[in-house]
Image (cartoon, helix red, strand yellow):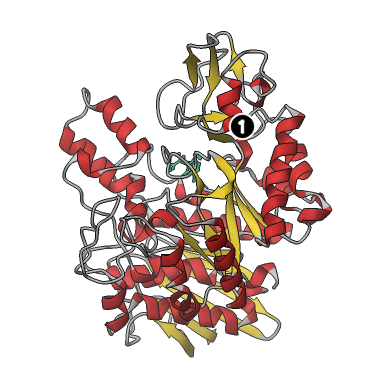
């Protein structure tokens, strides 16, 4: 399968489907939903980490890279899952967490035993903190370790120690892990915070260091990894380093997740509504740029770290169906590899918690603790409800029956669940299915050129062209109706039943060979 034909669906294993009723997702659950994924039409799945982990950061703190978490299932069950996915034409991409391990990983357990332990240099130790780097989850990134009286670096939780990629042994270990899974038959990797593996102490930067590209080539530029798909999670992307990561002749990555279009809020926990126009403007900029450079882009509006896109960019109250479907159109009709995050296909919205005890995520809990004396509790809860990572981690509601869940049950379950959506006349799932079918039918979506036609306060129009095909996508992203110039053409898709003179709130229309 060619890269441009891939249509991804991200599964967050702990919250996708619980097959044994213990309140956590598992392989049995995933396998019961293969038909669901096939019906939707996706042909690739990215699994967030499903390895052994104490779950301080939900699996992003890996204790054993070669073992499946017993909560998720056995190794044999995983191999079976892989086989079944492949038989059904679905590629499987795993999460590769290369910047850090859990402090429960045996490398770290040994490293912390003594300064001369052979594993000591697998991590980054200093007598005193050499800088004031902060953990992305709050507080200093340097943690004092009593036993050997030195500090180790942890860019995330205290229990996630950063690996020392300067050490060739670490790079050998990482290559062996990649090869282990490639040998098992997985089709690729999503690489967690990949741009952080090379540090730059001199320039005082915890990432994008001078050896970054060299390290990536060392791992993924080999014959063993020639045919796999790789996507690097890279927050600090610039047009120049995106070219370096993705130019095929450099043998680094297939593509990257860059986050410019999602960094539109003023600060991490700001409850204000972001400006969708700004999001689309940035998305459009990166579309044009990757196209100009001949690189593969990714397109996504959510993942397991982001609030629900409908709540964030759409209107979850009055126009949930319209905004969910139109945002789906933004993900599936642009240029590059689309990633649907679980639950988007039924228009899931943010949860509305009222108490801090309902949140689970370490980032949100740390934010709460750090601000409890400065900001009123209601305000803190409002901010976490709007921006916290638990929003994306609610158990996917398959039907309206309440379930036991490590997250607590989804607050909107009776209004929003798969069964109800599928039975509805206004089914978000059915619209996603149509979007995917459209993407598969017209090569201009997979191979075609992207051209921005118009972007103003609440109206976005772009065109995709390939040989004789020309398709226009019109999106009114405001709550007012807008009146684009009269347009004629064959309507391929419309998230309203009618086409009035004005585009209705969150209306998305796709025209073939439109003319004015
Ligand atoms: O989630 C965030 C807020 O939007 C980020 O700060 C996040 O930590 C960053 O996107 C890096 O994410 C990745 O690495 C983390 C892990 O917690 C995230 O779930 C993962 O996607 C550490 O492994």
- The answer to whether residue 89 is above or below residue 456 is below
Quadrant of the rendering where the N terminus is positioned: bottom right
Residue under the image location 61 percent in, 32 percent down: 207
**Nearest the camera: 234 or 369?**
369
Q: Position of residue 301 (x, y in %)?
A: 45, 58
Tally of marks = 1
- The answer to whether residue 368 is above or below residue 216 is above
Q: Position of residue 283 (x, y in %)?
A: 52, 57
The residue that mark 1 highlights is 207
Q: Is residue 254 visible?
A: no
Q: Is residue 134 visible?
A: yes
**Nearest the camera: 279 or 312?**
312
Q: Position of residue 103 (x, y in %)?
A: 51, 29
Quarter of the view holding residue 317: bottom left
Q: Position of residue 278 (x, y in %)?
A: 44, 53
Residue under the image location 21 percent in, 39 percent down: 356
**Nearest the camera: 203 or 169?**
169
């Amino acid at each position: 399968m060619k890269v441009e034909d891939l249509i991804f669906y991200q599964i967050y294993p702990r919250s996708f489907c619980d097959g044994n009723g213990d309140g956590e997702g598992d392989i049995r659950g995933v396998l019961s939903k293969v038909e669901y994924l096939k019906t939707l039409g996706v042909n690739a799945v990215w699994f967030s980490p499903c390895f052994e982990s104490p779950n301080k950061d939900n699996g992003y703190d890996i204790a054993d890279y070669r073992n499946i978490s017993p909560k998720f299932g056995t190794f044999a069950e995983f191999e079976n899952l892989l086989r079944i996915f492949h038989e059904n034409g679905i590629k499987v991409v795993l999460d590769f967490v290369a910047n850090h391990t859990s402090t429960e990983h045996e490398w770290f357990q040994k490293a912390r035993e003594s300064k001369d332990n052979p594993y000591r240099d697998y991590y980054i130790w200093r007598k005193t903190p050499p800088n004031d780097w902060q953990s992305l989850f709050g507080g200093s990134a340097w943690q004092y370790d009593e036993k050997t009286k030195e500090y180790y670096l942890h860019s995330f939780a205290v229990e996630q120690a950063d690996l020392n990629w300067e050490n060739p042994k670490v790079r050998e270990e990482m290559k062996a892990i990649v090869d282990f899974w490639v040998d098992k038959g997985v089709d690729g990797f999503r690489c967690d915070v990949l741009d952080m593996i090379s540090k730059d102490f001199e320039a005082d930067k915890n990432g994008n260091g001078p050896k970054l590209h060299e390290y990536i080539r060392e791992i993924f530029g080999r014959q063993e990894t020639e045919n796999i798909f790789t996507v690097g999670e890279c927050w600090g992307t610039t047009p120049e380093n995106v070219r370096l990561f993705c130019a095929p002749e450099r043998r680094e990555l297939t593509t990257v997740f860059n986050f410019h279009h999602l960094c539109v809020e003023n600060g991490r926990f700001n409850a204000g509504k972001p400006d969708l126009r700004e999001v689309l403007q940035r998305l459009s900029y990166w579309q044009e740029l990757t196209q100009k450079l001949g690189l593969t882009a990714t397109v996504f509006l959510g993942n397991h770290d982001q609030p629900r896109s409908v709540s964030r960019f759409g209107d979850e109250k009055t126009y949930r169906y319209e905004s969910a479907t139109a945002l789906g159109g933004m993900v599936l009709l642009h240029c590059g590899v689309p990633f649907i995050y679980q639950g988007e296909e039924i228009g899931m919205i943010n949860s509305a918690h009222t108490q801090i005890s309902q949140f689970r995520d370490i980032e949100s809990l740390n934010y709460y603790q750090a601000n409890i004396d400065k900001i009123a509790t209601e305000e803190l809860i409002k901010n976490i409800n709007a921006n916290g990572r638990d929003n994306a981690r609610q158990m996917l509601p398959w039907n309206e029956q309440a379930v036991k869940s490590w997250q607590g049950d989804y607050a909107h379950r009776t209004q929003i669940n798969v069964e109800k959506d599928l039975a509805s006349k206004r089914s978000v799932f059915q619209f996603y299915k149509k979007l995917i079918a459209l993407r598969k039918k017209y090569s201009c979506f997979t191979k075609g050129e992207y051209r921005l036609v118009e972007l103003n306060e609440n109206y976005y129009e772009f065109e995709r062209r390939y040989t004789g095909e020309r398709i226009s996508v019109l999106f009114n992203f405001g709550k007012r109706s807008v009146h684009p110039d009269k347009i004629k053409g064959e309507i391929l898709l419309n998230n309203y039943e009618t086409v009035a003179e004005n585009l209705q709130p969150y209306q998305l229309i796709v025209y073939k060979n439109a003319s004015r």
